[in-house]
Amino acid sequence: MNGFDFDLTGARLSALRSGALHWAGEGCLAVSDLHLGRSERYARRAGALLPPYEVEETLARLDADIAACRPRTVICLGDSFDDAEAGALDDRAALWLARMMAGRRWIWIAGNHDPGPVALAGEHLAELALGPLVFRHEAVPGATGEVSGHFHPKVRLAGRGIPCFLVDRARAILPAYGTYTGGLFAGDAALCGLMGAGALAILTGRAARPMPMPRGRNGP
Amino acid sequence: MRALPTPFRDWFAARDWQVHPHQQALLDRADAPAILLVAPTGGGKTLAGFLPSLVELAAGDRPGLHTLYISPLKALAADIRRNLTRPVEEMGLPVRIEDRTGDTTYTRRRRQRADPPHILITTPESLALLLSYEDAPRIFAGLSRVIVDEVHALAESKRGDQLMLCLARLETLAPGLRRVGLSATVEDPAAIARFLARHPDPCAIVHADPGPDPDIAMLTTASAPPWAGGGGRYAIPEVLAEVRRHRITLIFHNTRAQAELFFRDLWLANDEALPIAIHHGSLAREARERVEAAMVRGDLRAVVCTGSLDLGIDWGDVDLVIQVGAPKNVKRLVQRIGRANHRYNAPSKALLVPANRWEVVECQAALDAVRAHDLDGDPRGPGPRDVLCQHILIVACSGPFDSGALYAEVTSAGPYAALSRAEFDACLDFCATGGYALKAYDRWQRLMLRGGLWTLRDPRAARDIRMNLGTITDAEMVKVRWQNRLGGAPLGEVEESFASTLTPGETFLIGGQVVRYVGLREMALEVAPAPGRDPKIAVYSGTKFSTSTQLSERILRMLGQDAWPDLPRATAEWLALQRAVSRLPVADRLLIETFPAERRAHLCAYGFMGRAAQQTLGLLLTKRMEEDGLHPLGFVSTDYATLIWGLDEVPDPAALFDRGRLREGLDGWLAGNAVMKRTFRNVAIVAGLIQRNQAGARKSGRQATFSSDILYDTLRRFDPGHLLLQVTRDEAMRGLVSFSRIEGLLARIGGRIDHLRLPRVTPLAAPLFLEHGRVPVDGAARERLVEETAARLMAEAGLG
């Protein structure tokens, strides 16, 4: 598995190159900010008709991660759907999701885009405490053992914007997993304020690679 | 011959003016459905265009819009209105003249729709916007003439294609509409005529007297041009001396960054404090208007400028044009030279200042071409379909339409005369459903067929479509303004890619001032004055043109000479040195040098195909090198060569030029490379897939937007036959790719490739190391470097 292993308040975690977080000890896989249905929301609101393949693309990657990790629990850290109507996935996508959910615990954490529980199986929670960790959508200043998403962090390296995890002693922030998602550069004040000294940025892409979290230099 | 009515005759007589023959010709042929006037700058083109309208309007009280005048520049629209209003008032004609651009106030624009003037002066984009309103048929019902100014410039871009679609629309709303095009001297007037006229109407061409030949030379300087780099700053003492000797000098540069640097150094050397200003497209409108006004008042002795002054205000007193940097294109050089001396029968005076030794060669070739009246240019391709997609959306905004009628209308526009019904239907399908192989938007189509007519599903869409209208898709720009306690006044804008390299405290040049980057606020760069600090070089740039084929051929002929008595000594010696340590390129062979430099293996191929085609060659060669495991890292191209660097030396470069494999590389072209992605972004914006402006969009922007690269990758993977990928390919082939020039090169050299393996950088290759626009290759080598960089940073931080 192409992952980068690190410890968070006693839990041994692995940041996967896909942008998912694997907690082998608990048989748990976390992903954040799937933003399923974003292209449909654009169309519904009379905006541009984006290539309608982003749900398929995102689910295919998630399927591959699940097949590789065989998790007992999957946690989606919020902003899984772009809005309430986007939650009504087409039959093919809903079936695909149902097949992935079969035989395991599946938790939908609520995010700021999520309209509340959508008509899908699984548990719908505001946050989840599991062992030494707490899973929520948006990081809370001062929290420890916290796994969250929301910010879509990225770093600029070798001329490219690369989605990344941000990890320090107290928390891990996951990159956006969805295909049609933008990002916030890690040098942004909001992220610098949250992450402590010695924080790492773990790059996604062809391999999960750690580097010191950039501060200030990667803005604006 | 049609005589002028009395008030006109009296007015001309009072000024002791004669009607020019070409002005009379336009008057005589006022009833022609289409007419093209080709005249040098300052030939009285504007009045020639308006005279028939004024004569018709003078005849009686006629309500409503009679003449539409289209100018490519906003600034020009206001200027022309002022210049035209004066004679109209002096003759006491019952004619109302107004201008309408993006800068016109909302109330005024509303009033113009309710009660249009007799003559409306506007831009292509403002016309497209007017046509998107439901009351367009009423506004344009009585329209009789449309005058397209600087039609040669519009014909070079998508703005012209959009304008011709708009003229076709106008023809439907106002049958019998007459078209007049005003053009500078061009190499193929018949092509411009076909572009302008309603297909298949004929279009008469009137040539004005071209006037005497220009007085043009290379500026002689005390110090030789630098080995490489640009800007021509070595010539500042001589340029300043010329400014002193002339009344008003225009100093043209090819890029904004070079104009800024030159202006700063010119100002430092300007001991007499001659009034000299700077003018370019990245400066705030207020700053540009101040310069234009000072120019009109005659307060300035020189203006350092870029293509932003290629078209424009008639400044009669300019008596010298200085072109800094190689002109790239003889036609544009001739048009720039025409900016000097608008007295009709006096020669224009111009000086060329090569920025470096290579450009001395190019300038000499350009001088020879100007003297031989040898203009250049590439034939224009068919009207691009992304522009058609936008046009269909604009038409839909104005009301329901019949697809057959719209197809007939579109194919009456010159650039779209050869468009097939199937191609049109594909564009319509893209607008309606997105045109995807996966039919996902049945419920949310953008256009719906209702009662046999196409109409917007959701009328709210009209606002977004109007907000994103136009075909100008420059790099994303970030505004620059003073920090708030200084009033927050705007200074201009820089490219986002440049802005992202700045860290607080760093300094750069804008509008001739050194400023310090303070921070980013509401998507604008805030800066503070930093006089005396050494600025970072601003990389924001103007349009980069390719050296024309004709000019490149002249250069190659010149390189083949045994000696170069016409060239300055330093340049001649440089060429001789290249001949001594390596070889000089010749027309029927391809020279390739390989050498180590900066800890990387380098390969330099001298194709002389112009920047765009050399860029493509870089992409194709690096792709092949990647396939062959040669670890290319990146490349950079100029008009005459491509330099590739990588981790491994290329043992047999000739093998890379196998025609079949190059073609194959092109066929597998829609691979994710930077140039294609850049082209796709422009196409997607024009076609309406990416909306730059959205009503009520979140201010922060960042998190809401995702890159066009992701859309490109998604389409390539799931829908490789999609319309926008086809359009991207077509556009890249013609513009950024220029594959035809590569085929031309391969035919020219017929397999004759000379590979020279050298111990170090050669004289001719050296300038490429200083070029901007390096393209990274996203391959195995880069992956290796990312890995190494990340590891090194970890080690440095003690985290390894």
Image: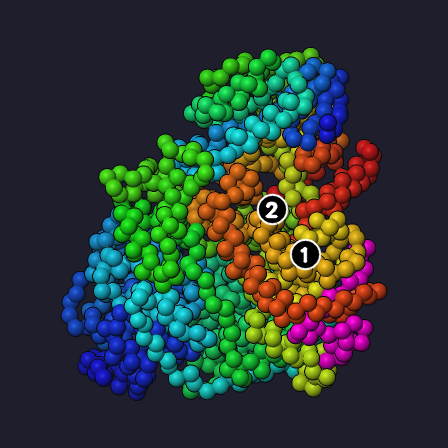
Residue at (60, 13) in percent of width and height: A104
**Considering only vertical position in the picture, is B723 above or below B798?**
below
Mark 2 neighbour class, 10 Å CA radius: few under 14, some 14 to 19, many 20 or more: few
Pointer 2 residue: B672
Q: Amino acid at mark 2?
A: Gly
- B360 is within the stretch colored magenta: no
Query: Which subunit holds the residue at mark 2?
Result: B
Q: Is residue B195 left or right of residue B137?
A: right
Pointer 1 residue: B621
Q: Nearer the viewer, mark 2 or mark 1?
A: 1
Q: Is residue B152 left or right of residue B122?
A: right
N-term mark: 2 or 1: 1
Of the 4 image quadrants, the one containing the N terminus of chain A is top right
Magenta region, residue range: B572-600
Find residue B222 and report its horizontal and vertical position in percent: 70, 81
Name the image quarter holding residue B145. bottom left
User: Real-space Cα distance between discs 2 and 1?
Assistant: 15 Å
